[in-house]
Image (spheres, helix red, strand yellow):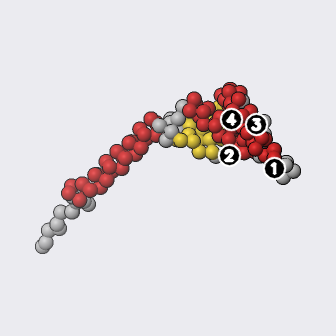
Amino acid sequence: MMQPSPPKPLASAESRFPLKMMQWVGCSFAFGVSVILVATNPKQTHYTEFATQTVSRLLVQDLCRANDRTPKLFDTMIKDGCQAFMQQGKAEIRAFIAHNTERQDFLLFSLYTTEFPIRPLRVLGVFNHFFLIS
């Protein structure tokens, strides 16, 4: 009578090595990206500067644009005067943004919400950059 052969192991140590190596590489990569995200999570002061420049630029585009009824002679004067006015008002814009902004810090990234009278401005801060959400 034949004796049954012993059961074979599911996987030998040699065949599990690439799997273990891939797990270590994956975990190391995820840890490295997490460390970079935490280190590059932008601070509120950086957001205030970004929002001030963005809002000022948008206001200049919207408010300093001469309309169709404006004589061409006054186009340059309107644009220059409006832009100079906006440059002087940046301190007030910066103070308004700093006072009306809520930061949600998720360690890897931050969400900023600035309440404006018309609608809120929502911004994602990650990798020392800002992305407008709405």
Please tell me whether mark 1 sits on a helix, a strand or a loop: helix
* Mark 3 → mark 4, Cα distance in angstroms: 27 Å
* Location of residue 35 by image quarter: top left
Q: Of residues 48 and 29, which is closer to you in this image?
A: 48
Q: The residue tagged with tag 4: helix, strand or loop?
A: strand
The residue that label 2 is drawn on is 134
Front disc: 3 or 4:
3
**Which numbered circle lies on residue 81?**
3
Name the N-terminal-most of marks 4 and 1.
1
Left or right, residue 118 beside residue 121: right
Residue that numbered label 4 is attached to: 114
Q: Which of the marked residues, 1 or 3, is nearer the chain's N terminus? A: 1
Which residue is at the far left?
Answer: 1
**Separation of disc 1 and disc 3 at Cα?**
15 Å
Question: Looking at the rendering, in which quadrant would you find the N terminus?
Answer: bottom left
Label 2 sits on a secondary structure element that is: loop
Task: Using the numbered discs, state the Cα–Cα distance from disc 2 to disc 1 in whole angstroms.
Answer: 35 Å
Residue 52 drawn at (x, y percent): 65, 34
Residue 72: numbered disc: 1
- Alpha-carbon distance for marks 3 and 2? 29 Å
Q: CA distance from mark 2 to mark 4?
A: 11 Å
